[in-house]
Image (cartoon, rainbow, N blue to C red):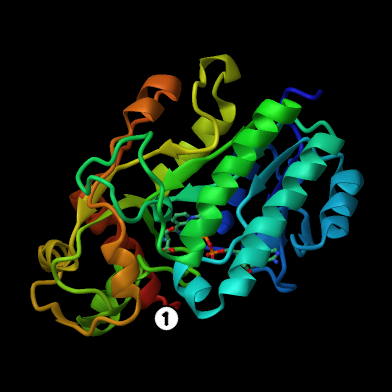
C-alpha cells in the first residue's frame, strides 16, 4: 500500500472547488504532479497551462483507470458531483454521478492500492429530526434531497472501504462555499456567491431564498485549507474518516445584505423564493465541528466580515478589467 501523497488526480477539477484546489495542490506538490480532470473538454487557460489536464467521466471506470496508469496516480481528490439544485431537477443523473462515480473511485483506490482518496460530503446529509443549532458530528441523517441521499450513502460507502479494504478514504461535510474564481455549479447556497457578483455589477440582487434563511457557510480559502489539512493529517489521529463536520460562520440572506452594505451602501435586495427554499429549510443553521478541531486541528481563518471585504475587493478588480 502506497502511503505518501506524490501524484494526484483531481476529478471535477473545473468546478467551483476543484478549480481552486488544483491550483493550490500544484503550488504545494508541483505542477506536473497534479492532474486536473473533468467531463468537460475545455479547461480555462490557468488550469490548462499550469499542468496536465485529462477528460474523465467518473461514471466510466475505465476513464479513471487509464489516467491512474498513465500518471502513476497515488491520491485522488474526487470533486466531481451533481449538486443539490441540479440534483432535484435530475435525480437519476445525481444518483448516477454521485454514487457510481464514487464507487468507481473507491474500487480503483483498492485495486491500485492508493495512498489516499478524498471524497467531499455536504451539510445536505442532514434533514428531518436534527437540532438546527450546532448540529453534532454524530446525528441522525435523514436528507430530503436526492443530493443529500447520495452524500449520506457516499459517506457510508467510504467508511465501508476504510474498514473492509483498509483504503485510506477521508471526507468533510462542507457548508455552502463562497468564492470569486469559478461560479458554483447549481446548489442551494449559490445565492451567497451570486449576490456578490450582482452587488458589484448592478448594486441589486433578487434572492431565491427567504430573507431569514440561516445556513452555515465558508470562504474558499478555508475550504481549500480544510481539504488539504485533512488529506495530510496523520491517519492514526483520526477517529472519524469520511464525514467530518466543518464550519466557519452562518448567516441569512438579510444579514449578508447588511454586511455587503458596509461596502456598497446603496445595495438593494429583494426575495423571490423558489424550489431551493425547501432544500435550505431542511439544513441546519450551524454546525458543531469540534471533532475536526480535535482530530486534525481544523480552524477557520475567515469570518463573515473578512470574507465579504475580500469578495468585494476581488470582484471589483475583475469588474474594472471587464472580466465579469
Ligand atoms: P461543481 O458543481 O462546481 O463542480 C463539479 C464538477 O464536476 C463540474 O466541473 C462538472 O463538470 C463535473 N462533473 C459532473 N459530472 C461529471 C462526471 N460524470 N465526470 C466527471 N466530472 C463531472 O461542484 P463543487 O462546488 O466544486 O463541489 C465539489 C464537491 O464538494 C462535491 O462533492 C460537492 O458535493 C461538494 N460540496 C460543495 C459545496 C459548495 O458549496 N460548493 C458544499 C458542500 C459540498
Ligand atoms: N453548496 C451545496 C449545495 O447547495 C451544499 O452541498 O448543493
| The C terminus, quarter of image | bottom left
Rendered image quadrant of residue 139: top left
Report the side of 283 relative to 98 (left or right): left
Residue 16 to residue 162: above or below: below
- The residue at the point 45 percent across, 73 percent down is 85
Residue 301: percent from left, percent from top? 31, 38
Query: Taking the image as four quarters, which one is ligand 1 found in?
Result: bottom right
Residue 164: percent from left, percent from top? 72, 29
Say whether mark 1 is within 8 Å of ligand 1.
Answer: no
| The N terminus, quarter of image | top right
**Which residue has dot 1 on it?**
322
- The residue at the point 58 percent across, 27 percent down is 232
For mark 1, give the secondary structure: loop
- The residue at the point 44 percent across, 45 percent down is 173
Which is more toward the observer, 51 or 110?
Answer: 110
Could you classify mark 1 by the number of other residues whose Cα lies within 10 Å: few (under 14), some (14-19), or many (20 or more)? few
Count how many numbered circles sit on residues in the image.
Answer: 1
Rendered image quadrant of residue 289: top left
Residue 262 to residue 2: above or below: below
Judge whether residue 71 can be spotted in this image.
yes
- The residue at the point 19 percent across, 74 percent down is 210
Residue 245: percent from left, percent from top? 39, 38
Residue 250: percent from left, percent from top? 22, 51
Which is more toward the observer, 16 or 49?
Answer: 16
Judge whether residue 13 can be spotted in this image.
no
Amino acid at each position: 500500500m502506497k502511503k505518501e501523497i506524490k501524484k494526484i488526480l483531481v476529478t471535477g477539477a473545473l468546478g467551483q472547488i476543484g478549480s481552486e484546489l488544483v491550483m493550490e495542490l500544484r503550488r504545494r506538490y508541483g505542477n506536473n504532479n497534479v492532474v486536473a480532470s473533468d467531463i468537460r473538454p475545455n479547461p480555462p487557460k490557468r488550469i490548462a497551462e499550469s499542468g496536465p489536464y485529462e477528460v474523465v467521466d467518473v461514471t466510466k471506470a475505465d476513464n479513471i483507470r487509464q489516467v491512474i496508469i498513465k500518471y502513476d496516480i497515488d491520491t485522488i481528490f474526487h470533486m466531481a458531483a451533481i449538486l443539490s439544485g441540479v440534483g432535484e431537477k435530475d435525480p437519476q443523473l445525481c444518483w448516477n454521478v454521485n454514487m457510481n462515480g464514487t464507487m468507481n473511485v473507491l474500487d480503483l483506490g483498492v485495486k491500485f492500492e492508493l495512498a489516499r482518496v478524498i471524497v467531499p460530503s455536504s451539510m445536505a446529509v442532514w434533514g428531518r429530526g436534527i437540532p438546527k443549532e450546532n448540529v453534532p458530528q454524530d446525528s441522525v441523517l435523514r436528507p430530503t434531497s436526492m443530493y443529500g441521499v447520495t452524500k449520506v450513502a457516499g459517506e457510508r460507502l467510504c467508511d465501508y472501504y476504510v474498514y473492509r479494504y483498509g483504503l485510506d478514504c477521508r471526507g468533510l461535510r462542507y457548508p455552502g462555499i463562497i468564492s470569486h474564481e469559478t461560479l458554483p455549479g447549481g446548489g442551494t447556497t449559490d445565492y451567497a456567491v451570486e449576490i456578490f457578483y450582482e452587488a458589484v455589477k448592478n448594486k441589486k440582487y433578487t434572492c431565491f431564498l427567504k430573507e431569514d434563511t440561516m445556513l452555515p457557510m465558508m470562504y474558499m480559502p478555508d475550504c481549500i485549507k480544510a481539504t488539504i489539512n485533512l488529506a495530510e493529517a496523520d491517519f492514526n489521529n483520526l477517529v472519524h474518516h469520511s464525514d467530518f463536520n466543518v464550519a466557519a460562520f452562518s448567516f441569512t440572506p438579510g444579514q449578508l445584505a447588511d454586511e455587503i452594505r458596509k461596502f456598497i451602501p446603496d445595495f438593494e435586495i429583494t426575495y423571490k423564493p423558489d424550489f431551493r427554499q425547501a432544500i435550505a429549510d431542511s439544513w441546519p443553521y450551524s454546525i458543531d465541528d469540534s471533532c475536526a478541531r480535535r482530530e486534525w486541528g481544523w480552524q477557520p481563518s475567515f469570518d463573515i466580515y473578512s470574507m465579504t471585504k475580500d469578495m468585494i475587493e476581488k470582484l471589483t478588480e475583475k469588474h474594472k478589467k471587464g472580466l465579469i
